[in-house]
Amino acid sequence: MSPSFQAPAGTRDVLPPESARWEALVDCFARVAGQAGYGLVLTPLFEEVEVFARGVGESTDVVSREMYEFEDRGGRRMALRPEFTASVVRAFIQYRPTTPWKVWYWGPAFRYERPQAGRYRQFHQVGVEGLGSDEPHLDVEVVALAWRFYRALGLTRLRLDLNSLGDGVCRPAYRSALVDFLGSRSAELCSEHRDRWQLNPLRVLDCKKEECRAVAAGAPHQLDYLCQPCSDHWGAVLEGLQAIKIPYVVQPRLVRGLDYYTRTTFEVAAEALGTAQDAVGGGGRYDGLVEALGGPPTPAIGFSLGIERILLACDAEGVFASAGSELAAFVVDVTGGAAALAITEELREAGISADRAFGRRSLRAQLRTADRSGAAVALIVGPEEAAAGTVQLRWLRSDRGQEEIDRAKVVSRLREELG
RNA sequence: GUGGCCGUAGCUCAGUUGGUUAGAGCGCCAGGUUGUGGCCCUGGAGGUCGGGGGUUCGAGUCCCCUCGGUCACCCCA
């Protein structure tokens, strides 16, 4: 059968019971972020195009060819957010909260790309941003937070890649050294980069083609060109990570696709994922971004983790299974439904989760539904119970059998049984 | 944006070199037990074979287009 409409390409519907994992994942992240002093921030799903164009960088793929742009009815040029950081920074500048400003978020982001395993046009992220401090310990805290979250889900086969991109002082020096180097060997680059390596020399280091890798292997590293402050910062970050025993791999060639990164950058790869999209999260410092968007000079760092990819990684590692039902009671009524209505609502008012069957089905059919609902007990009302003012309390998850109790004592009895 | 593979019940899939009314398992519903779930047995519902066009006496099967999925490039979460 082909439905008249289906979810747009690159988007997905998340239905129960799968959606329970999403709730649990976001809950988990909220807990980890909350206990580190990060508060929830909610920003609009769309912003003026310029927020992203100036924030993420005009030349990046994300901005130049992947944004969902539209003109609103007032003629304003808007874009669905392709990432969160620019929006959060915009809000920071707008409200000027006291620093350090530590926030976490979750929600959808949009990029018009060709869908693929672990890559969607609407995808979802959880993340944090910490603004107002350039202390290396903030870098460490942020990385540790991500790491703790992954571990809390049960993921173990992760690799933390780390690099420093330097700052406005030392990056230009490195860049010119890299340009000199690539210029001397441009003929050896892959067909794609041979003529265009100057557009973004850093990209060449990340190219997966044999030719480029061979050249990149001998290329100068940013790490060797760090100025003293950046070098000190880098050293302190590594020291901090060692002090709290978070394993990392220095990847001098780690280049991230957004223009705003400075100094510390990192990426977390799920080695259990056999796909090309194995990055389950990434982030780094963006000490110049607040200023670039019109705010006061404000160092900052943050990360975003992809919910879809994290769940794929959890599948690959066989962890973080969907939680079972939390339903306490299921009401079975074969007298017409009035008792089911009264009892389920009474239970819910009392804070006890309860569900029921609809459709005047047979006792047997309703009990089957009760069983599949995962409820701990079934409360059965037949003609005899209705006449006597009682209900049968039947245990579904143990062999305690069933007992007849007073209709008026249902709530108190379930309270003591279920805690 | 480029290329490879795929698209048959709600789900996972069969379907001989094109050949009558398109099947199975699981799930769902009902009955076996006129008051009792899980196990078992029986039956039932459910498909314009992704959509459109073409070739053919005849298309689930071949061709084209299109939509969607998937994998890789690219990029990233």
Image (tube, rainbow, N blue to C red):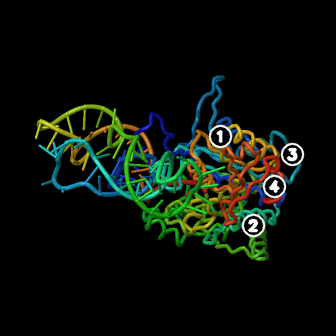
The numbered mark, 1 or 4, whose residue comes first in the sequence reads 1
Residue closest to the eye, A48 or A125:
A125
Question: Could you tell me how far apart the alpha carbons at marks 2 and 1 are, in whole angstroms?
Answer: 58 Å
Q: Residue at x 79, y 60 (%)?
A: A417
Circle 4 residue: A413
Name the image quarter holding the N terminus of chain A. Answer: top left
Q: Are marks 2 and 4 on the same chain?
A: yes
Q: Nearer the viewer, mark 2 or mark 4?
A: 4
Q: Amino acid at mark 2?
A: Ala
In the rendered structure, are the residues bearing label 2 and label 3 in contact, judged by CB atoms less than 8 Å apart?
Answer: no
Question: Could you tell me how far apart the alpha carbons at marks 1 and 4 are, in whole angstroms?
Answer: 23 Å
Q: Amino acid at mark 4?
A: Arg
Circle 2 crowding by C-alpha within 10 Å: few under 14, some 14–19, many from 20: some
Question: Could you tell me how far apart the alpha carbons at marks 1 and 3 are, in whole angstroms?
Answer: 61 Å
Circle 2 residue: A144
Residue A38: percent from the left, percent from the top?
A: 81, 55
Q: Which quarter of the picture shows residue A224?
A: bottom right
Circle 1 crowding by C-alpha within 10 Å: few under 14, some 14–19, many from 20: some
Q: Which quarter of the picture shows residue A394?
A: bottom right
Q: Mark 3 belongs to which subunit?
A: A
Q: Mark 1 belongs to which subunit?
A: A
Camera sees residue A334? yes
In the rendered structure, are the residues bearing label 1 and label 4 in contact, judged by CB atoms less than 8 Å apart?
Answer: no
Q: In the figure, A93 relative to A201: above or below?
A: above
Q: Are marks 2 and 1 on the same chain?
A: yes
Circle 3 residue: A97
What mark, if any, has residue A335 been given in the picture? Answer: 1
The numbered mark, 2 or 4, whose residue comes first in the sequence reads 2
